[in-house]
Image (cartoon, helix red, strand yellow):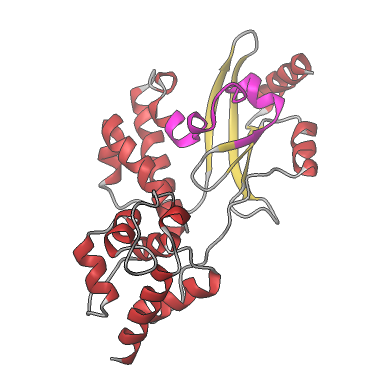
Amino acid sequence: MAHREELSRFLKSARARLSPTDVGLPAGERRRTQGLRREEVAALAGMSVTWYTWFEQGREVQLSVPMIERLGRTLRLDANEREFLFALAQHRPPPLETQIDEDIRPATQHMMNSLSIPALIIIEDWTVIGWNPLVTRAFRDYAPLPRNERNLFKILMLSERYRNDPSHYREMGHRLVARFKWDYSRTSKPEIFDEIIAEMMERSELFRECWQESNILPYSEHINIALMPGVGDISFWHSSYAVEGAPGQRLILFAPLDAPSAERLAKLAAATR
C-alpha cells in the first residue's frame, strides 16, 4: 500500500540524517551507509530489532502510541514530522502534546503567599512544585526534598504518617488511586506515570489492590484532618483548580471545614507570620 511505502521511506530518511554522536553513541568505525543502524534505533526506542525492522519495511504491524512517541523522540522528529508519522502509522493525528509548565509565575506565588489557608501546586504526575508557608506548618516542608521525593501521590500512599487509622488509610488509598487513574488516562506523558506505577506495584500492597479496581475519580475534593501540636485538630476541605495559562499545573486549596477549625487555622497562620 502507498502509505506503507511512504512510511518506510520516511523512517529510512529520518534514520539516515542522524549520526551516532547526535544520540549520545560513540562514533565508532566508518560506516558504509550514512546514519543510524536499525538496531541502534530499536535499542534507543525500547523496541525489538525485529519489530522495528518490520515497521520500517512497511509491514502490517501495529505500534502503540507510547512506542510511536518513543520512536519519534529517538529520530528527533519535529512537531510536523511527529504528526506525519502518526498519520502514516495510525491514520489519525497524534495525541495532544502539552509541554508541562513547571515554572510558577510570580503573581501565582504571591497570591498563594497572601492566602490565609494552605495552598500548593502540583503538576500532572502529582509532583509538588510550589507551596505557601502554611503548607510547611500544616503538612510538611517540601523545600529540603529533592524533586523526585516531592511526589504527593507517593507521599500520601507510602508515608507511615497516614496509617495510624487503617480504615481511613484504605479509604484514602482507594480515592487517591481512582484519581491517579483518571490523570493517567489523560496524560500526554504516559511513560512518567508508568515509572510511578511500577514503583508503587513493588512498594505498596494497597496500591496493587486498588489498581485492579475499575474506579475512577475525575475531580479532587475531600475532607482531611490535620493534627497541629499546640493548636489541635484542623478539618480541611480541599479542592483543586487548573492554573490558567500554565499547562499541567493544578492548585490545591485547603479551607477550614468549620468554625473551630477556622479559629485554629487562624492561630497557626498568626504563628507562621
Instruction: State the residue lying farthest toward the bottom.
Output: 2
Residue range corresponding to the magenta coloring: 129-155
Front residue of 151 and 6 = 6
Front residue of 60 and 143 = 60
Instruction: State the residue lying farthest toward the front.
Output: 30
- In the rendered image, residue 50 lying in the magenta stretch gets the answer no
User: Which residue is pictured at 37% across the width and 43% down the height?
Assistant: 195
The answer to whether one can see residue 182 in this image is no
Residue 199 location (% of width, % of height): 33, 36
146 sits to left or right of 36: right
Query: Which quarter of the figure is the N terminus placed in?
Result: bottom left
Quarter of the view holding residue 258 = top right
User: Which residue is pictured at 34% across the width and 32% down the height?
Assistant: 170
Residue 145 location (% of width, % of height): 55, 24
User: Which residue is pictured at 25% across the width and 78% down the height?
Assistant: 57
Residue 74 location (% of width, % of height): 41, 59
Query: Which quarter of the figure is the C terminus placed in?
Result: top right
- In the rendered image, residue 136 lying in the magenta stretch gets the answer yes
Quarter of the view holding residue 146 = top right
Above or below, 38 relative to 187: below
129 sits to left or right of 193: right
Above or below, 128 relative to 89: above
Above or below, 178 relative to 264: below
Front residue of 37 and 112 = 37
Instruction: State the residue lying farthest toward the left.
Output: 50
Residue 179 location (% of width, % of height): 44, 47
Above or below, 254 relative to 260: below
127 sits to left or right of 266: left
The answer to whether one can see residue 4 in this image is yes
